[in-house]
Image (cartoon, helix red, strand yellow):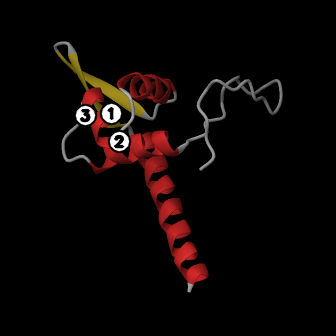
Amino acid sequence: MLLNYPYTNYKIDSMEPKNTVLLFKDKQIRILLAILKQEKQPYISDLAKITGVTYVHTSRFLSSCEKLGLISYERHGKIKTIFLTPKGKEITLQIQSIIEKLKIEEKKSNN
């Protein structure tokens, strides 16, 4: 999937803010889908274990997502649980839909 998070200085015109392009790669998609699929709000360490992504990478990606309004944290002492914002849920559901459509198309082309 295309999407690489805000390390890009891509600008369409001077009126658009920097870092507006968000490109998701496999690891980032797995993290967002894991949040979506969890019955209770996960911790960062839970997401790292579930997705097989390092804690540091997971934490950095989630920080970028928070800045973009895709996720929010809820503090429980020193521990933070993560949940998708309405915007984050909508985008994650769209990504999930795209993945499912690609799988269907791949199956059709293999038959």
Number of marks in the rendered image: 3
**Does residue 110 sit above or below 4 in this rendering?**
below
Q: In the rendered image, which quarter is residue 76 located in?
A: top left
Q: Which x, y percent locates residue 87?
A: 45, 41
Disc 2 marks which residue?
51
Pointer 3: residues within 10 angstroms few (<14), some, or many (20+)?
some
**Residue at the spot x=39%, y=34% of the render?**
53
Residue type for callout 2: Thr
Residue 34 quadrant? top left
Q: Residue visible at 50% across and 61% down?
A: 99
How many residues crowd around disc 1 within 10 Å: few (fewer than 14), some, or many (20 or more)? many
Say which element carries label 1: helix
Residue tagged 1: 48
Q: Earlier in the sequence, mark 3 or mark 2?
A: 3
Mark 1 and mark 3 in contact? Answer it, CB < 8 Å.
Answer: yes
State the residue position of label 3: 46
Above or below, 42 against 101 in this view is above
Residue 90 vertical position relative to residue 70 in the rendered view, above or below: below
Q: Residue furthest right?
A: 13
Q: Secondary structure at mark 2?
A: helix
C-alpha distance separating marks 3 and 2: 9 Å
What separation in Å lies between label 1 and label 3 (alpha carbons)?
5 Å
Q: Position of residue 36 (x, y in %)?
A: 33, 47
Horizontal and vertical percent position of residue 93: 43, 54
Mark carried by residue 15: none
Is 31 in front, or is 107? 107
